[in-house]
Structures are given as C-alpha cells and as structure tokens.
Amino acid sequence: MRPKVLWAITLNTFRETLRDKLLYSLVGFAVLVIAASLLAGSVSLGQDARVIQDFSLTAMLVFLLIITYFIGTQLVFKEVERKTIYLVLSKPVSRETFYLGKFLGLCLTILVAGLIMATMFVAVLAIKTHQVPVAAYFAVGAVILEAWLLTAVSLLFSSFTSPLSSAIYTFGVTLIGHGSATIWLLSQKASPVVRGILEGVYYVFPNLEKFNLRNDVVFNLAPDITQVVWILLYFVGYTAFLLILGMSAFRKDEF
Amino acid sequence: MLVIRNLTKQFYQRNDTVTVVDNLSLHIKKGQVFGLIGPNGAGKTTTVKLVAGLLFPDKGNITIAGQPAGSLEAKRKIGFMNENPQFYYHLKAREVLEFVADLFEIDKKVATKKIDVLLREVGLKDAKEIPVRKFSKGMHQRLAFAVAQINNPSLLLLDEPLDGLDPLGRLDFKQMILKLKSAGATIFFSSHILSDVEEICDEVAILHRGKIILQGAPKALVKSSKQSLEELFVRSIRHEA
C-alpha cells in the first residue's frame, strides 16, 4: 500500500463529502442543538452543567452517527453508480488502498464535523460554568472513535448490500452495541442454548458502551490511563478486523 | 504488447449463465492500432474491462507487456478510457488530472507540465478551471482522453471513444488518435462506428456473441471480399446469427 496514493484517495473522498449538502445541514443542526442545551440547562434547577454535558455529547454522537449512516453507506455505491470507480481502479491502485482511502476520507470528515460540534460544546460549557472538565475532551474523543468504528461497519455492509440496507444494518449494530451490557446480563439468566446465542452476540458485535464516557463527564471523573488505552486498543483491534473483512469482500468485486 | 489467450467471461443471472466472452484469443503487437468491432452486446466492453483489470476472467489469461492484466505493474503501463466517462463532480478538469497523476505517483513538477500539454492537445486549455460537472459529453470525452495519457502509457485502451460525439468532435478525436498512431502508440479500442475503425486501425476483429468471427487488416478484408467494411460486418453478423 503506497502512502501517496492512499492520501490522494483519502483527500479526494474528504473533499467529495464536503460537497454533500446533507453534511452541512447535519453539522449546522447539531451546532444549534448543542447551543440549545444552554436553554435546557437554564431550566434544570442547578444541574445546568450536567444537562449541557449530557445533552451536547448525546447530540454529537447522534449527528455523527447520522453522517455515518447516510454518507458512509453511499461512499462506494456512488463510485460504482457514477462510474468514477473506473477512473481509480483502472490505475495502479489496489482494491485495498481504494477501500482504506474511502474509509479514511470519511473519518477525516467525521473528525472535522466532530471538532466543529466539540468547539460549540466547549464554548457553551465555558459560557455557562466557566470551566471545562478534562473528561469532556476524552468523552468527545470517544464519541469520534465510536463514529469511526461504525463507519467501518457501514463500509463493510455497503460492500455487499444496498445503501439503505447498509444503513439499517449499521443502525442495528449501533443498537446491539449499546445494549451489550443488557445482553450480557440477560445471557447469564437464560437457558444454556439462549445463553450461548446471547454470549455469541455479545462477543461478535462491538461493545459500543466502552466508548460511552458521558457519565464520567457528568460526574467529573477523568478516565484513568488504563481505561483510555483499553478504549484505543479496542477501537484499533475491532476497526482493523472490520476493515480486513471489508477489503476481502471488496477484492472480489467486479465493476 | 497485449496477449489474450483463451479468454472466457460468464455472467450469472438468477438461474442462467451468459457467456459474454467465449474463448477469445488476440495478439496485439507494439505500435499496432487494433479495433474491436461488433454489435451491441457482443462483448466488446467486457473484453476491454477484462484487459483493464476491472473484471476477472473465468478462464484464460491476459498479459500486457508480459505482466498479468489487473496487476499494478500492468496498470502502470495502460491508459484507459471507458465508455461514457464520468468524473468527480467536485473537481475541476485540472484537478482531475492532478488526482490521476497522484495515483500514478508522478512527480508534481513533471505532472504539472504534462497536464498543461495534455489539456492543450485535447482542446480543454481554457476549461481547465471549470468544474467537470459543468462539462458537456464531448468535454468529458476529451478529458478522459487526456486522463488516459497522463502516464505515457505503452498501451492505450479506448472503449467506444467516438460514441456520442458530434461530427466535429469525432473528427478531432480521430486526428488525436492518428497523431498518437504516427508517434508509435499501441492502441486497442472498441467501436461500432465502422468508417472510423476502417480509417484508424491497422487490424480489426469482428466480435459477435463473445467470439471473433472475422479478423484482419481492414484494407485486406475489403479487398478480398470486394465489399465495404460495413457490408462485410453486416454479412458476417447475419451469417453467424
């Protein structure tokens, strides 16, 4: 995999997604929702910081995931539909480089969108409480990591199904991923067969609650270094696994 | 330069298998302009895509200057222009060429000079800062022709390069192809516009249902059959049908 080629595809994908009007609508709406948390905070009887943090971080996650569902699932599909994929794959570009470039391009878009939302969140928090806990930055980082991981999920699904199906499946993975703890608890009380199935679901699907540091921010608990390293390792390991799976499927595709 | 041996490609549809390219063999020498002609659905585009590495053969093999088609080494040697070329809407003509130059890892300075030359040659010098989404079909074709030459390819693969162009555009394109031919380029192209093929090619092959039914130098074919290439084409296809 050649870095210059990978970077060319990443940058092109980033620029392409920046032209998507949906992205601007979503980022704009997210910024408005985060700004609106000021109002929500002001009617919360002394819990304004807690409400702003919880409200804003949840809004960030939701809007970044919508970007993933709607733009991520279309990335490869649009290339095939518009035949622009011929422009790239007839050149000395491996399928793996193309696939990874599309992933990194959208990750860059999500990072920029996330940073715009985070700037608004920090500004709102600073205006209202005159302090921004360190945990807030970790929580923002974890939200972005979760969106990146789900981008890999959406790209994997979009390599063998339609954008709509891919968006629905990715949404399903999000729901299961955030219900991991519940699935584990249920499995411990179930019959051996159901237990096996639920434990299988628990281990196969990503545990997205690992990226949920929103409560830590609300209670002003900075995550310890072990937790941060574990989150990073989990993200790298699971995302790499998804990308390898996606690349294997994409390698056999014909256009 | 281009060797195709016993190439077969099938497409699978629900309960049916369609053989689009059927045991096809071709040998295109360096400096030769080879035209693959045939009716719609004959397998021309599939053959070109197989050579470009966009499709994988079910049987047989293709080599480009000794390298297997689809390998990065083979792709470095080819310039490919697909039928109805499309580009990223957010890019300008110059940016499309810069992007493709990056894919070939061409040095920035070298690429900039080459891009200027190519844009001038294809008549898009004044349109280089216009986003491609505002381009007409003819301008898309011209840009695609420039893109196909950015790496000074050993083999130029053109799929229906003259399709959909107005008479002026076709004339320009023919002149550009003839210029490359006189410079010694190896060109493999598909078309169903017989007069153009007759004018440009050193050798032609008529493809029907994935098989070559007639092959030779256009002038020799016309002379031996005492028919125009168009008459010969129609007769060959009807005879096979």
Image: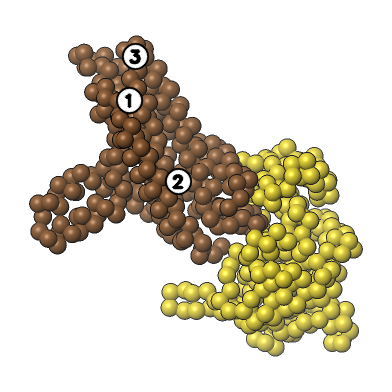
Q: Residue at x 43, y 50 (%)?
A: A240
Q: Secondary structure at mark 2?
A: helix
Q: Secondary structure at mark 3?
A: loop
Disc ID at residue A135: 1
Disc ID at residue A131: 3
Chain letter for mark 2: A
Disc ID at residue A72: 2
Label 1 sits on what residue type? Ala
Label 2 sits on what residue type? Gly
- Circles 3 and 2, Cβ within 8 Å, touching? The answer is no
Q: Residue at x 50, y 37 (%)?
A: A108
Looking at the image, is mark 1 or mark 2 nearer the viewer? Answer: 1
Residue B226: image x %, image y %? 87, 86
Residue A150: image x %, image y %? 38, 45
Spatial CA distance of label 1 from label 2 is: 28 Å
Figure chain in yellow: B
Label 3 sits on what residue type? Gln
Residue B134 visible in image = no
Residue B73: image x %, image y %? 68, 62
